[in-house]
Amino acid sequence: MGERKRRQETLGDGYGNPQEETVFLNFTRSQIQVFYEVVTKSTWYCIGGVAVFWVVFRVGVAQGWWG
């Protein structure tokens, strides 16, 4: 028997419906996936911002902008 048939027999009418990933937070898998995407994108923006800040700071010190 295939895995799909076994799950369909086990879950009955609930087969194919989104399941809750965490019981205490009540988030579905699709909501968690969206959260991961947002966090990943914002992390890359922050890394880029730190890199730009570092370059500007190093150039500014070399050019004598602050002192």
Image (cartoon, rainbow, N blue to C red):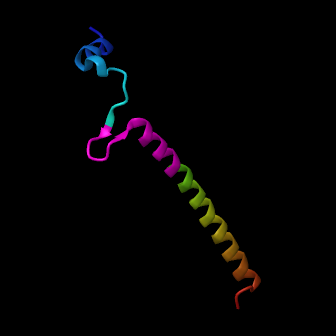
Q: Please, which residue is most extreme toward the bottom here? A: 67
Left or right: 49 as drawn, with respect to 63: left
- Across and down, in percent, residue 27 comes to 36, 42
Residue sitting at 67 percent across and 76 percent down? 57
Q: Please, which residue is most extreme toward the right here? A: 63
Question: Looking at the rendering, which quadrant does residue 19 occupy?
Answer: top left
Task: Tell which of 64 and 37 is nearer to you.
Answer: 37
The answer to whether residue 31 is magenta is yes
The answer to whether residue 36 is magenta is yes
Number of numbered markers: 0
- Across and down, in percent, residue 29 comes to 39, 36
Image: 43 above or below 34: below
Q: Give the range drawn in magenta.
A: 21-39
- Across and down, in percent, residue 58 comes to 67, 76
Q: Please, which residue is most extreme toward the front here? A: 13
Residue sitting at 52 percent across and 49 percent down? 38
Image: 30 above or below 49: above
Image: 40 above or below 14: below
Task: Tell which of 14 and 60 is nearer to you.
Answer: 14
Task: Tell which of 63 and 14 is nearer to you.
Answer: 14
- Say which quadrant the C terminus sits in: bottom right
Question: Looking at the rendering, which quadrant does residue 10 occupy?
Answer: top left
